[in-house]
Image: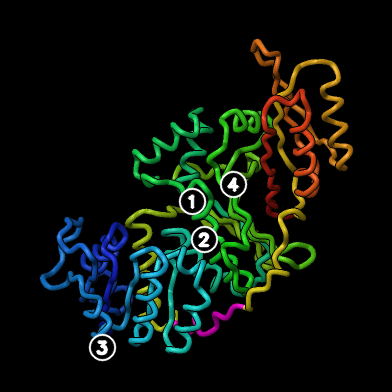
Amino acid sequence: MADKTIKIGLVGFGTVGSGVAKILLEDCDYIKAKTGLKLELVKIVDVDTKKERPVKLPAGVLTNDLNSIVNDKDIQIAIELVGGTKIAKDIQLKMLAAGKDVITANKALLAEHGNELYTAAHKADKCIAFEASCAGGIPIISAIRTGLAANKIKAIYGIVNGTCNYILTNMTSKNESFRTALKQAQDKGYAEADPTLDISGGDSAHKLAILSSISFGCEIHPEDIFVEGIENIDIADIRYGHEMGYTLKLLAIGQKTAEGKISLRVHPSFIASENALARVDGPFNAISIFGHAVGHTMFYGRGAGMMPTASAIVADIIEVAMGNSKKLFKHLTLEPRNKDSIAKVDDLMSRFYIRLRVLDKPGTFAQITSILAKHEISLSGVLQHEEQNSNNVVPVIIITHQTQQKKISAALADFEKLEMVKNKPVCIRIVDIPQDGD
């Protein structure tokens, strides 16, 4: 059988776009031998056609004219890698209207406008493939939609932001402050000059919106997700948590509650140090998924970077070219958004870590326990260290049993009113991830 030729257009020639071009140009013979597909990158569009890139292009491939792809009927697949939402959305809609299948790594766009784009693709009888949008080179979208297709997904626990994981790893293993660890991440290229989207939890929320929508089969927007970042994490809490058997990670969590609602949240989480996710270090990502039939599965790898993300994009090209993506995409239908189906964070049941800095004098602990009792919060453990300072102030660490978030919030407000509490209380959720066999 003759090899099948697939002509490809790429919009966006930045870091990831350069990686895609590198694979398509340098590994085309290997891909053809493996798949029977001759992948031809015939056009790249970028606003900057002069910048040096780590890949040499044939003459005439690079241009700043978007219509060179839109109007070329021979180009079957268009890749959008410009980032952002407005311009990227317009580009994708133009490509679909022009009869091209679309591949993207644009997590923000899909999180905010995914259902609209999916609907446009269905109307055009085309598909959108987005493996690279959530976890770089980890094939998590494919796993959920094919390998785990027989499963009702019960829960997702993910470390999906390499910047935050690198920072927390350095704070844990090297005893670095948040600012020092962030600077290290920026120096190594793991963090942007403006790291706000990463450290605030926004990037993880975009990825969770996509993963949860395809896992639970309903339209989810970023505003449905409770988000808390790592920018206020103190090295002291990492040390105290470690003493009590916990490791701190920024987790993206999507789970079905006992009432059938969907709980969606991104926040710093203490998890048992023996849990597999606790051992995911540096810029790596990992996602644990629990299905009703398969039980626990875990996916691990590089969640960002030029070549890992390019790997996922080229995998999508192959799946689209073979017709697999289109068949699967026809069945990507999401139930309309229903706010009543999203669990409220105030109703979240969890264990909690609380740190108070209090005056070391008789009656202090009695006041603390009185407030906890008032809000029906049960103690699981307490840790207190002597602290050498002239103000006679000591840290008290409290671990609670399972209780509602709203009860903890009320107790924290009461703690702040106490004269003997000298700083704003610190509260971090303890996430009990199920183990195999649970």
* Amino acid type, label 3: Lys
Structural distance between the alpha carbons of marks 4 and 2: 21 Å
Element type at mark 4: helix
Where residue 171 sits: x, y (%)?
A: 51, 33
Residue lying at 59% horizontally and 56% vertically, measured from the top left: 288
> Which circle's residue, 4 or 2, is located before the other in the chain?
2
Element type at mark 2: helix
Please say if 429 is above or below 47: above
* Amino acid type, label 1: Asn
What residue does disc 3 label?
73
Q: Are marks 3 and 2 in contact (CB under 8 Å)?
A: no
* Amino acid type, label 2: Lys
**What is the quadrant of the C terminus in the image?**
bottom right
What residue does disc 1 label?
161
What residue does disc 2 label?
207
Where residue 261 sits: x, y (%)?
A: 73, 66
Which numbered disc covers residue 276?
4
**Magenta residues, start to end:** 326-334
